[in-house]
Amino acid sequence: METGRRGLMYRMLIVDDLPVIVEGLLDMFGKRKPELELHSAYSAYQALDILGRMRINIVLSDIRMPGMEGIELLHEIKRRWPMCKVIFLTSFDDFQYVKHAISGGGFDYMLKTESDESIVKTVDKAIAELDAEAEASQRLLEANLQSKQAITLLQQAYIHTLLKGTARTSESSLRSKIHELEIPLAVERPIYLLLGRIDSWGGKGAQADRKLMLFAVQNIAGESLRQTARFAAAEVDGSNVAWLLQPIAPHGESGEGAQEEAEEAWLESASKQLDAVQANCREAIGLAVSFVISHAAVRWESLPEAYDELLSLLWGEQGAGSEVKLTGLTGPYSPRSTLEAARSKLASRKMKKIGLLGHYLENGGKAEFDSLLDEIFAHAADENRSSFVKLEVYHGLASVFLSHVNLYPLDGKLAAQIGLDRLSHIDVNLSWQELHTYFRKLAELLFANREEPAAEDEHVVVLRINAYINSHLAEDVSLVKLAGIVHLNPSYLSRLYKRTAGIGLSDYINMARMEKAKELLKHSAYKIYEISAMVGYDSRLSFIRFFKANMGVTPQEYRDS
């Protein structure tokens, strides 16, 4: 087969009712273009038989043949192989007939009396067009893949905001985001929350390996869960995976009682599915995984509270061990237990202060950090020496430190000195003093490490860049500005972003501008020139050209539609 400029292979079929012409063309192309895979037919019907058995890229055909003429053959070729290039050879200088053939989808035509060089040149032109079409198709395929990768990153980022309580949870906001990010969940229905934890990494210490393993856990669980539920998943805190689940409604009886029975049956089925997921994770990727699932579906706005509860269970005393499987303590309307009340009281008084430690770590406030850490441990130890309080403080501090380590990674030697594995494996037998000493030592190491910051994790960089772009569209979002925010070389940031997000940085900026413009056009009364400035265009005309190039209509036409 012919090798085009892009290394593609092509077949050509020569069709004529005169064998002397067919044999002559076969001989000529065999010598001049030996890379072409050549086929021959002595009638349109023979040609159709060949076209039915294999894909033909180029057809070189007589335009007038007995039984079925070239134009009829052209229609059949285009029906079977729309991209095939049909070149007509004719002994008749019949302009109207040839014009009809070309308007029907023919690629080109020539007289049989033309030179071999002219015929080869026309075939070369057809090959060049096939190359161009193949290249365009490949670009479209790559663009679709990159878009899917970008959507996946954005989905995960949005799930993070839902779990952390920073997302807007009005019905209109949820509906808009879920539609925009192609999340297969219904806003009007509550959510079951499932958390998974890697119990042991099995020697897979590199961050890239761990991300791959977390992705594998998502896939294994997804294969089982999609049988009975729609879901969206996200990696959380480096060693957990969260799933938002909605059971697929069964056909049959309706009503509140029937629905409750159906959901109870689904929850029981999901528990059995998790047994299979644990077994598959153990056998396929060599990892032990523990799970905890909410006892009942929760409202979207209650996801942060459900997440906190499940996380406390998973990393608490009940979650100790390997391949644990738990169910949340409470449903959305159950009375709060004494244990939960104690947790809430501690959270309101201590967790805000624990969160402030992250601010001091980020901004180099070592003295303030040390003072606040001492205060937190002194008060917690004096107030309540129960294991629950210890777990709560441990979990809060571990979250702060893990978040910081993700942003400013330690090298392997330093990480080994402090024992970072303690952050993900809580030891309730440690004394308050031992915990205090551990976190003080870890803080000293982190402050020292921040003096020469390491490169951020690539996915964190992308998420930080995306968040900045989305909230600063009207400001400077140039490559130089964005590189300064994450302390990277502009050229390196450009390569890193495209490699990690799957799309170019400028493509994401344009996408963010387009989505913001569409939202403002549909849901605000701002004038076009005001929206233009709000999404980063100084010129209203530039904005209109940009919008029409992407949407096919002007901003005003889009607003009016």
Image: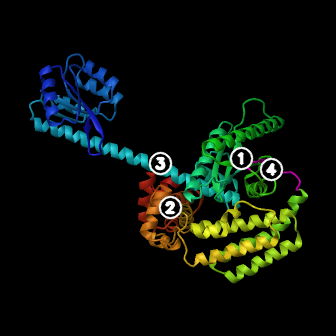
Nearest to N terminus: mark 1 or mark 3: 3
Pointer 3: residues within 10 angstroms few (<14), some, or many (20+)?
some
Q: Relative to the observer, which residue lies in front, 491 or 208?
A: 208
Image height of 424 relative to 228, above or below: below
Which-is-in-front pick, marks 1 and 3? 3
The residue where tag 1 is placed is 188
Tell me the quarter of the picture where residue 74 sits: top left
- Which labelled disc corresponds to residue 180? none
In the drawing, does residue 214 fall left or right of residue 87?
right
Q: Is residue 40 above or below residue 162?
A: above
Q: Nearer the viewer, mark 4 or mark 1?
A: 4
Judging by the rendered image, the residue that carries numbered circle 4 is: 328
Residues rendered magenta in the picture = 322-336
Identity of the residue drawn at 66% across and 65% down = 420
Q: Seen in the image, is 517 located left or right of residue 157?
A: left
Residue with the mark numbered 2? 513
